[in-house]
Amino acid sequence: MANCKQDFLREVEGHTVLCAEITYGRDYWDDKDRRSARLQVGFSGEQYLAFLEDIDYEYDSGFGRQEVYGNIWYTDGTWSERAEYDGSEWWAYKSCPEIPKELKSS
């Protein structure tokens, strides 16, 4: 089993979080099981702790359907997005790729 809060904390280690939005839960029976947690730009320490409490959710990250979705934006312009393949899910860290020289004007 995995924990959404612990996954989030591992993913943001070494980064400064700007904001985040995470949706989680089992939606294959009833949409009422889906919940969302949002951390808005300019959040306070108290709001951060409440967000972490909201996403303290146990799930199986390697079997069945994806249960955690979302994005985490960092102050340096990079982000992490939730990814899934064949029932396994993880956070994928992203940064804007360098523009190839062929696309730059001379």
Image (tube, rainbow, N blue to C red):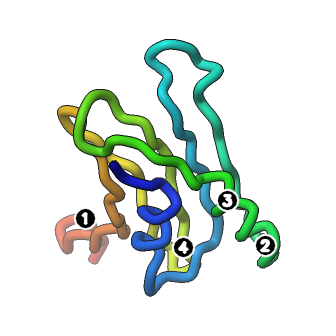
Q: Which residue is mark 4?
A: 74
Q: Does residue 28 appear to the left or right of 42 in the view shown?
A: left
Q: Amino acid at mark 1?
A: Leu
Q: Amino acid at mark 3?
A: Glu
The residues tagged by marks 1 and 3 sit, at their Cα atoms, a distance apart of: 45 Å
Mark 3 nearby-residue class (10 Å; few <14, some 14–19, many ≥20) = few
The residues tagged by marks 3 and 2 sit, at their Cα atoms, a distance apart of: 18 Å
Q: Where is residue 5 shown, x and y percent of the image?
A: 52, 60
Residue at 39% x, 50% y is: 82
Residue 81, image quadrant: bottom left
Nearer to us: label 1 or label 4: 4
Q: Amino acid at mark 4?
A: Tyr
Q: Which residue is mark 1?
A: 103
Mark 4 secondary-structure assignment: strand
Q: Residue furthest bottom?
A: 14
Mark 1 nearby-residue class (10 Å; few <14, some 14–19, many ≥20) = few
Q: Amino acid at mark 2?
A: Gly
Q: Are marks 4 and 2 in contact (CB under 8 Å)?
A: no
Residue 86, image quadrant: top left
Image: 50 above or below 59: below
Looking at the image, which is closer to me, 78 or 19? 19
Nearer to us: label 3 or label 2: 3
The residues tagged by marks 1 and 2 sit, at their Cα atoms, a distance apart of: 35 Å
Q: Does residue 47 appear to the left or right of 31 in the view shown?
A: right
The residues tagged by marks 3 and 4 sit, at their Cα atoms, a distance apart of: 20 Å
Q: Which residue is mark 2?
A: 42
Q: Does residue 8 appear to the left or right of 103 in the view shown?
A: right
Mark 1 secondary-structure assignment: helix
